[in-house]
Image (cartoon, rainbow, N blue to C red):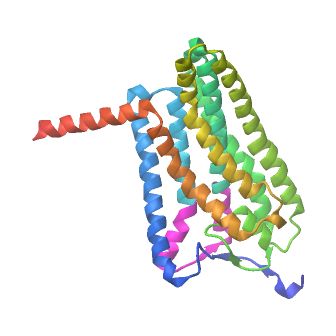
Amino acid sequence: MEESNKTVMTYFIIKGISDVPALQLPIFLLVLLIYLIIVGGNMTIFLLISTDRHLHTPMYFFLANLSILDVCCSTITLHKPLITFITGDKSVSFVGCVMQMFFFLSFTCNEVLILTAMGYDRYVAVCNPLRYQVIISRKVCCGLAGVCWVLGFLDIMPCALKISSISCYTSLEVNHFFCDLVPLMKLSCSDTSALQLYVLIEGVFLSAFVPFSLTFISYVFIIRSILRIRSSKGRWKAFYTCSSHLTVIILLYGTLSYQYFRPVEYITLGSNKLSSLFNTTGVPILNPLIYSLKNKDVKSAFKRKFRKISNVKNNTE
């Protein structure tokens, strides 16, 4: 590539979800609606778990962490399309772009690790129910959640540092609606082979393979224990306690594997944008729906909360 085509960046232009002028208002309204649903749904789950003593269990403790992560991940990615429509400013500083990428990947990594901890929780609940309260104590829950949060940020730090050291790009326009790793690597005119190798090794083995393997092993033992239950009703009840978590696992790993675990040269920015859009909007919307609609405890907590609100309202009238 010729030297004239190389640009030293101090800022980027975020292209956005679509270039069509007629679609800007509908996209803004749709993104705003989706964001409000994500925040409303996940914060409702979080507040319900925080205030209802019946939900003060390890499973719901991890679910509360998952709800916070969904809100953080959506906020860090969707705020730019919303601000761009209001202000018309598509630019983002180089440092701001790297920070956005770092937090998005960190929150995603945190989510994978929290889901792994939830898999261990389900394993103990199904395979060793008599010692569940002893093994999954409050101290253990806080320790696992703390490790997940710290590891998620430390895991992405080398990648963010490497991206921040790249100063040569072929264009200042990022064909995405936020600063993601793949679009930045495709824009770089520097050699990114070492970074791609790190992403492959770190992503496949640490951020994906190890958590997925631990979750898979947990479910091997869970399924084996379920098959040993004699009554079909007992088997269904045991599987039902894991169904919500298993559904979320399939959704998240499916989108992440399609989005990141391919060689950069085979990834088209259009397909990457669509998978990112689903990962940052679809998964955070579905998580609270899956856990609320498929979970009797959460539905009972909703009923108790509405009953309490109704009683207070009737007493004040």
Image x and y of residue 187, in percent: 78, 73
Rendering coords of residue 107 (x, y %):
62, 50
Pick the residue in front: 300 or 83: 300
Q: Is residue 47 above or below residue 134?
A: below
Query: Of residues 199 and 251, which is closer to you in this image?
Result: 251
Residue beneath the point at 65% across and 60% down: 275
Instruction: Please tell me in which quadrant of the rendered image residue 144 appears.
Output: top right
Q: Main secondary structure of the magenta part?
A: helix
Q: Residue furthest bottom?
A: 4
Magenta residues span: 77-103
Image position, residue 297 (x, y; %): 42, 30
Residue, x 72% and y 26% (percent of image)?
220
**Along the line of sight, the residue nearer the viewer: 241 or 57:** 241
Report if residue 99 lies within the magenta region: yes
* Quadrant in which the N terminus appears: bottom right
Query: In the image, what residue occupies the spot 70% across and 33% down?
Result: 215
Residue 100 makes an appearance in the image:
no
Quadrant hosting residue 184: bottom right
> Which residue reaches farthest left?
317
Numbered label tally: 0
Return the x and y of residue 57 as percentages of the image width and height: 49, 26
Q: Is residue 130 visible?
A: yes
Horizontal placement of 171 versus 85: left or right?
right
300 w.r.t. 8: above or below = above
- Magenta segment includes 22: no
253 relative position to 80: left or right: right
